[in-house]
Amino acid sequence: MTMDERIEQRLIDLEIKLSYAEDTIDRLNEVVVRQQLQLQTLAREVARLRERVDDGSGAVLRSLREELPPHY
């Protein structure tokens, strides 16, 4: 294999690796975007629940013993 062939093969190998790396980065970015949306949704839900608790309109907190079925 000549020097030019080796260089060409190395370039091809690098291009293949770069292609895989770009694909991985794209997929990871999609995951990060989805997780950010989930975090925003959860933050809104927590804020809404805090408002309910602060307003006193939330469910009354009871102990687990009060939740046992009557036959216990």
Image: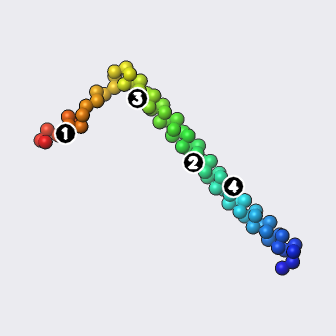
Q: Report how far apart the C-alphas of labels 4 and 2 lie in the structure.
A: 14 Å
Report the disc number at residue 49: 3
Residue type, label 1 = Leu
Q: Which residue in the protein does label 2 denote?
A: 31
Residue type, label 4 = Glu
Q: If you read the primary sequence from the N terminus, does the residue marked by circle 3 or circle 1 appear first?
A: 3
Report the disc number at residue 22: 4
Q: Which residue in the protein does label 1 denote?
A: 68
* x and y, in percent, of residue 58 in the image: 34, 26
Q: Secondary structure at mark 3?
A: helix
Q: Report how far apart the C-alphas of labels 1 and 2 lie in the structure.
A: 41 Å
* x and y, in percent, of residue 9 in the image: 79, 71
Q: If you read the primary sequence from the N terminus, does the residue marked by circle 4 or circle 2 appear first?
A: 4
Q: Report how far apart the C-alphas of labels 1 and 4 lie in the structure.
A: 55 Å
Quarter of the image where the C terminus is located: top left
Toward which corner of the image does residue 8 lie, by quadrant?
bottom right
Q: If you read the primary sequence from the N terminus, does the residue marked by circle 1 or circle 4 appear first?
A: 4
Residue depicted at 65% across the width and 52% down the height: 25
Q: Report how far apart the C-alphas of labels 3 and 1 lie in the structure.
A: 25 Å
Image: 56 above or below 65? above
Q: Secondary structure at mark 1?
A: loop
Looking at the image, is mark 1 or mark 2 nearer the viewer? 1
